[in-house]
Amino acid sequence: MALTSGDVELFRREFLELHSYDQAQYYLQLDPGVRETVYHYLSPNEMADIYVHIDVDQIVNDSLMQEMSPRYASEMLQNMFADDAVDVLNELDKNQVASYLTLMNAEAAKEIKELLHYEEYTAGSIMTTEFVAISKNQTIRSAMYILKNEAPNAETIYYIYVVDELKHLVGVLSLRDLIVAHDDLMVHEVMSDRVKSVMVGEDQEEVARMMKDYGFLAIPVVDFQEHLLGIITVDDIMEVMDEEATDDYSKLAGVSDLDVVDVSPFSAAKKRLPWLIILLVLGMVTASIIAQFEETLDKVALLAVFIPLIAGMAGNTGTQALAVAVRGIATGEIQNKSKRTLLLREAGTGLITGITCGILITIGIILWQGTLVLGILVGFSIFASIFVATLAGSFVPLIMHKVNIDPAVASGPFITTINDLLSIFIYFGLATLFMNYLL
Amino acid sequence: MALTSGDVELFRREFLELHSYDQAQYYLQLDPGVRETVYHYLSPNEMADIYVHIDVDQIVNDSLMQEMSPRYASEMLQNMFADDAVDVLNELDKNQVASYLTLMNAEAAKEIKELLHYEEYTAGSIMTTEFVAISKNQTIRSAMYILKNEAPNAETIYYIYVVDELKHLVGVLSLRDLIVAHDDLMVHEVMSDRVKSVMVGEDQEEVARMMKDYGFLAIPVVDFQEHLLGIITVDDIMEVMDEEATDDYSKLAGVSDLDVVDVSPFSAAKKRLPWLIILLVLGMVTASIIAQFEETLDKVALLAVFIPLIAGMAGNTGTQALAVAVRGIATGEIQNKSKRTLLLREAGTGLITGITCGILITIGIILWQGTLVLGILVGFSIFASIFVATLAGSFVPLIMHKVNIDPAVASGPFITTINDLLSIFIYFGLATLFMNYLL
């Protein structure tokens, strides 16, 4: 590109031809030194379009905005849609935010400040205040006129929200309705008054589920008195869906965060060690349980051979049951009424899988070791462990959900290790009980 | 509701007041017997709006459409958007599909047949053919006129695609541009010719990523000659994102499917047993490895105590690394160039976590058992296992991705069991080597 050659005109012509997402990709792979030039070649307004497509974490980690002059940065922020600007500011430190806000024009600063103090992961934190609202007592023609003027600034013009004199949300009108409607009709004749909205404090995951279920492109956000505060657009919802999916996924794997590249091994290790150390301790507990049975082990060392098998099976079935329950809660498929159904179902599943695996392993051991008793012992232990593990796997997340803890916290490794412990106890307990037959 | 009372008018008034999603929820919780009445009270066209909001699996599992007369069902299907109808038909058996298609009007049947033979999970399978396309050589006014007429039938009117005489895609125009543009301008003066499109055979996950990155509400689908075949709208993409997330998640947990409720324990067990049996076999391999070391075990039964701890740690670190790699590939964060970076990073992470856990466990065992040698043995084994497991966890999915297998197939339980095996081998290998010091 003409960036290094210093030909501003050529660069702008080539660069602005690209879609803003591609502009962002190009911008990101430049060296900080070269980026300096970009800030001279592009206006803060043009840079704002680019920044919408850059992951907030990356903006912060690579401290991209420190490369710009504070004035340039703040002007860029004020040209972004308020909600996107807020996403960025939320991650910066207080002083930086303050200085940017003071450099902005008062109006933009006010809009952003309003959004800044909504809690993260709530509807308020992802809504934008740039939307089109019209009064119910005007003609379609005048509504259309307003729309044409607002279009450039609004984040979406495909839903137009209708408010009364007191700014209460009273209806909605899709641009589609507007276009096909006759110009002389009144807005309230055309609008739908069955408008769905979310409370400003609503959980973003809940908002995402609602927009997906109803197939909305945008949804209005209201306070407890039904005042229209802002709207949430589908592009932000797609980000949320990605976040939430990654979140459940990482918890199932026991990683606090899934930053993939450009992260030092140390920070990566820091994110995994907390879990590993908890599991280390739980592992020691399991070890001490086995130690209780050392006498048994001394008599029949062969018992040790099947420890990983039994623990492993218990761990895996537990994880399966856990995943079903957690995902079911996340997608909203599991309502309170269906919880009992699920537990009964899982109990049945545990029985069937347990019996099947138990019988298979018994046969396997008889063929391999030629000892009936050991076969039955291991087989029965596997059956019991799988049954218990399946119940534990589905029960734990449901309990957590009931007491309003994110069930995904009962992550895979945790359930696995707990089930290791239970299964080992079952196995050696039975072995000790029936020692006489084993010898 | 007035359903049982037999008051058609009252029922229709109350029912049609609801949003079609809520109508679907109400419809689904009725008894099959009562639903019969609904089919008499509502037109196939009205039912079509409802069915868009019903999960396809549920339609099939509860064989809902068998409750309707074939004529009613086919008329409903022809009133749905082609892509939604196809989603349903794809799940029904050939004969049923055939009979529905014959009952439909020829045009609708043709549209659907065209879509039916696109492979599942490709752009073609989720696109719709109901879109607005205009020619580049007409005025904005005439385009607006076309739009007003097409609006009721098109799935979205917010992007209008521009084609040349040979139906090649040459540009795109958002309704927003259309509204603010002057009526007498020509379409090609206003349209953007930098229109992004996807090939009909493109993977739906890739399409979803693209729409999310670029923030599109719809994207055009073309064949290899750039002919415009259809469009994909954001509501379908949200379904895809949900599918793909659940898919990765279930694979990490080793469940082939996450059907939550309304599933018999038997079908649930059938979905989990394949994995469990594979793992059972792998577990037997692990067992036979330990059996090789029975002599060692006989000498120092205490060794058995730490088997679950070591296997567990290896399994968990492996799963963590796996999750990072799989999710990174899924979100597209991992490009080929960054694969080496990731592996190096993971190697470093493995070293750090391994050393930390190794030292902790060594100290723990010295304090608990008071034996230095055993402590060092277990500590070193933990270190080595974690290091190997971390590398395996990130290496396996990357390899799979390279050979175009869905990396998520390297599911958690699988990696876990493989790592159990490796770690046990390391542990007993070392124990046997240094037996003299242990005694």
Image (cartoon, coloured by chain):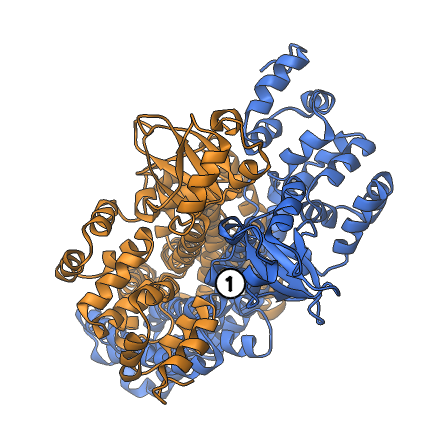
Chain colours: A orange, B blue
Q: Which class describes the residues within 10 Å of circle 1: few (<14), some (14-19), or many (20+)? A: some
Q: Residue at x 59, y 32 (%)?
A: B24
Q: Would you say residue A159 is visible in this rendering?
A: yes
- Which residue, as the protein is rendered here, is positioned at the far bottom? A5
Q: Would you say residue A347 is visible in this rendering?
A: no
Expressed as whole percent of the image width and height from the top left, the position of residue A430 reads: 44, 53
Q: Quadrant of the N terminus of chain A?
A: bottom left
Across the whole image, how many numbered discs are drawn on residues? 1
Q: Chain of mark 1?
A: B
Expressed as whole percent of the image width and height from the top left, the position of residue B223 reads: 71, 67
- Which residue, as the protein is rendered here, is positioned at the far front? B184
In this view of the protein, which residue sits in the foreground, A372 or B147?
Answer: B147
Q: In the rendered image, which residue does mark 1 sit on?
A: B209
In this view of the protein, which residue sits in the foreground, A327 or A225?
Answer: A225
Expressed as whole percent of the image width and height from the top left, the position of residue A27 reads: 37, 75
Quadrant of the rendered structure where residue B78 is?
Answer: top right
**Above or below, comparing residue A124 to residue A138 in the picture:** below
Q: Is residue A108 left or right of residue A352?
A: left
Quadrant of the rendered structure where residue A163 is?
Answer: top left
**Above or below, comparing residue A59 to residue A252 in the picture:** below
For badge 1, the amino acid type reads Arg
Expressed as whole percent of the image width and height from the top left, the position of residue B86 reads: 72, 48
**Above or below, comparing residue B348 to residue A173 in the picture:** below
In this view of the protein, which residue sits in the foreground, B35 or A433?
Answer: B35
Q: Residue at x 72, y 71 (%)?
A: B225
Q: Residue at x 30, y 38 (%)?
A: A201
In this view of the protein, which residue sits in the foreground, A221 or B374?
Answer: A221
**What secondary structure is found at the residue carrying circle 1?**
helix
